Amino acid sequence: MTNFLHSTLNDVPMEGKHGVVGNVKWHCPAQGILVFEPEVDAEASVVISAGIHGNETAPIEIVDQLISDILNERVAPLTRTMFVFGNIEAMKQDKRYLDVDMNRLFGEESAVLMDYPEAFRAQVIEFVTEDFFRHEKSKFKIHLDLHTAIRPSFHERFGLLPYVEKGKYPRSFISFLSTIDLDAMVINHAPSTTYSYFTSHVCNADSVTLELGKALPFGENDLGKFKAIKDGMYRLISKTYPSSDHSYDKSFQLYRVSQVLIKKSDAFLLNFDDETPNFTSFSRGELLATDNNFEYRVEHDKEWVIFPNNNVRVGLRGGLMLVQDLIDDYCLNENP
């Protein structure tokens, strides 16, 4: 097979194609999606996605390298692994999205907006992902959704763990995340329409959205800055998961969502520049945003903002406010 990313971006028909490389079978269940299955029985199934936002190029390039290394037998997966290039049409045009933000379309929201091609693509990804994780021998299910940010951040690399009802995350998964050089971790407090929440809630996967720095055009990324996440992904698919060592580095800062700045109407307006860096802090009582006569204010002694954006659709979040917390309170001890 020729370069998979090149084939995807140039509309080379790949759906339904399959083959073997070394001791690994591959097949393409849909355009821009590639599955590798090792000859040995694998207890872990891993999804690695990039390009859900089309202009977030560094993750796309990293995934392209990993696929190439597998196809050229430089890496031999020991896990069932599926790679997803998300918003292909936006990737071609180096745009975040064309009509609607794809990472707000997973779950029931995609059915509401089916007039948009991005909603149809989200449904294709959902269907293929559910089918992949349905494998009867998948004892461990992992999803890494790779992104880069549209604004600067005081924590350059951070992860967002989707809301889970039990409120805790497997220690083995936190242990893995502590090895990939993240500066911070954010715990969501409610269901959402993101891809990582979909895989967590619907597929029962251990999922995370990874923000890995600033978005740049194709070819302008210094991929050396992403060595830790690249090495982590290589370990994840080429070694037995989970590692017997469930310890984790506590050097990253943990935050949890304290309030959501919902855009209830077109009158919504942040009280600060929406180019404000992620993890900018505010003090108790400060005005954060207004929406007609409604005011959002800081409710704790100190809160931090991520993803401030005046220009989202009505009904979506115009920002998330965070408070600091302790990672130990959110780790689920697993049976040895």
Image (cartoon, helix red, strand yellow):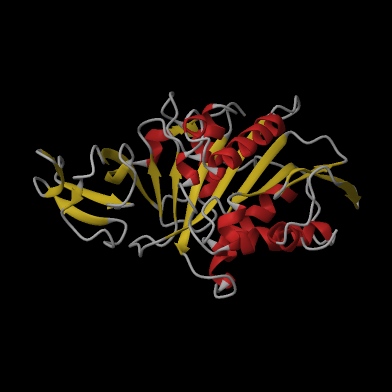
Where is 210 relative to 3, above or below? above
Q: Quadrant of residue 168?
A: top left
The residue lying at 26 percent from left, 41 percent from top is: 263
Q: Nearer the viewer, residue 98 or 19?
A: 98
Visible in this render: residue 248? no
Q: Residue furthest front?
A: 115
Q: Is residue 293 left or right of residue 171?
A: left
Q: Residue 115 at x, y = what percent?
A: 52, 38
Q: Is residue 327 left or right of residue 68?
A: left
Q: Quadrant of residue 93?
A: bottom right
Where is 226 relative to 282, above or below? below
Q: Quadrant of the C terminus?
A: top right
The residue lying at 49 percent from left, 38 percent from top is: 105
Marker count (numbered): 0
The residue lying at 59 percent from left, 53 percent from top is: 50
Q: Is residue 94 left or right of residue 193?
A: right
Q: Residue 3 at x, y = what percent?
A: 78, 63
Q: Residue 262 at x, y = what percent?
A: 26, 39
Visible in this render: residue 230? yes
Q: Nearer the viewer, residue 322 or 9?
A: 9
Q: Quadrant of the N terminus?
A: bottom right
Q: Nearer the viewer, residue 111 or 132?
A: 111
Q: Residue 57 at x, y = what percent?
A: 56, 63
Where is 103 relative to 223, above or below? above
The residue lying at 74 percent from left, 28 percent from top is: 135
